[in-house]
């Protein structure tokens, strides 16, 4: 076999190896871009809406939450449940676009900005954060407890993979109908799927719980990260985003440096192979 042919085969195999190695990272970047476009589209839709529509949609959501607090509507039976049934009334609440985007969840500590959708079907959990039907809609207010679920450990998406890194005092944000609400983490729990007592509405409280599966890769339990409403400060959110962006740059993009080094190594090897053949 000619040296040129050997070099071509070597390069193809080497690039294939690099492609396989980089695929999860590139997929995550692509999916983050897609999620970012959904967020932008949601915000643009809100900007084009009349304020009266805002008011009506918020009032409808608040009425739904009041019915939950009063026990008129049924609550949660499983923290990651998908009933498989579509409640048309529920789906119409806070639905401002064709994708059914309910709002936006931002977690600066984890560098996340994710769309929130109705329900926790597998289709929803493959593309973003699902609102757990039977919990309060995420519009805030006294005696509300919204529950938001997402997957962790997906090879092509980050989602809630790093949710266990949140600690008491960290703040996350929920944006709905043009309003941003801040929630400070006050506790975490690891429970069995049917243990939903901690997800119930607490009289007078304004709570949001983030939910994912745990332990990582085994998924026999549920991780709850509980947040309590605090006053929103835009400056504090922006400062946290900038701080985390600088700190996480290397942890997010170390693979780029590795890829460049591997490509340089490949070029050197091919050069040496061809030079050896000509000597």
Image (tube, rainbow, N blue to C red):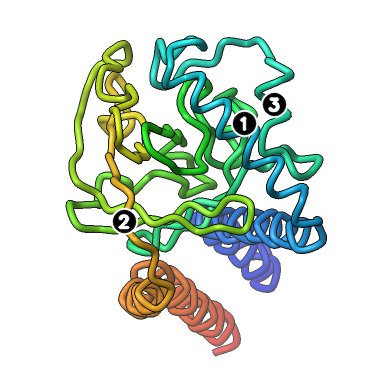
Residue 158, compared with residue 72, is above or below; it is below
> As rendered, which of 126 and 70 lies closer to the eye?
70
Element class at badge 1: strand
Determine contact: label 2, label 3, CB under 8 Å.
no
Check residue 118 in the rendering and tell me which mark sits there, or answer none: 1
Instruction: From the image, tell me which residue sits under label 2.
Output: 230
Q: Look at the image and tell me in which quarter the C terminus lies.
A: bottom right
In terms of image quadrants, where is residue 28?
bottom right
Instruction: Specify which label sits upstream in the sequence, 2 or 3.
Output: 3
Query: In the shown orientation, is residue 79 left or right of residue 62?
Result: left
Q: Residue at x 63, y 38 (%)?
A: 59
Q: CA distance from mark 2 to mark 3?
A: 28 Å
Camera-near label (2 vs 3) is 2
Say which label, 3 or 1, has the lower sequence index: 3
Residue in front for this viewpoint, 69 or 183? 69
Q: Which mark is residue 91?
A: 3
Please tell me whether residue 232 is drawn above or below residue 244 in the rendered image: above
Label annotation for residue 37: none
């Amino acid at each position: 076999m000619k040296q040129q042919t050997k070099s071509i085969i070597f390069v193809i195999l080497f690039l294939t190896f690099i492609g396989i190695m980089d695929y999860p990272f590139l997929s995550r970047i692509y999916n983050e871009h897609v999620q970012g476009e959904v967020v932008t589209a949601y915000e643009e839709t809100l900007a084009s809406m009349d304020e009266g529509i805002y008011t009506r949609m918020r009032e409808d959501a608040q009425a739904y939450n009041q019915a939950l607090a009063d026990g008129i509507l049924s609550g949660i039976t499983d923290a990651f449940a998908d009933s498989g049934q579509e409640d048309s009334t529920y789906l119409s609440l806070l639905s401002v676009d064709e994708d059914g985007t309910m709002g936006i969840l931002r977690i600066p500590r984890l560098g996340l900005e994710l769309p929130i959708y109705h329900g926790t079907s597998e289709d929803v959990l493959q593309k973003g954060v699902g609102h757990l039907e039977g919990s309060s809609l995420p519009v805030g207010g006294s005696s509300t407890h919204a529950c938001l679920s997402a997957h962790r450990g997906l090879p092509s998406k980050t989602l809630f993979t790093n949710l266990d890194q949140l600690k008491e005092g960290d703040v996350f944000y929920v944006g709905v109908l043009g309003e941003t609400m801040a929630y400070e983490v006050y506790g975490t729990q690891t429970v069995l799927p049917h243990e939903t007592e901690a997800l119930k509405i607490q009289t007078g409280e304004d709570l949001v719980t983030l939910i994912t599966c745990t332990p990582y890769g085994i998924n026999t339990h549920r991780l709850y990260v509980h947040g309590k409403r605090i006053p929103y400060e835009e400056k504090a959110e922006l400062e946290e985003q900038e701080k985390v962006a600088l700190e996480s740059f290397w942890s997010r993009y170390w693979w780029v440096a590795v890829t460049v080094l591997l490509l340089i190594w490949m070029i050197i090897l091919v050069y040496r192979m061809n030079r050896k053949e000509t000597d």
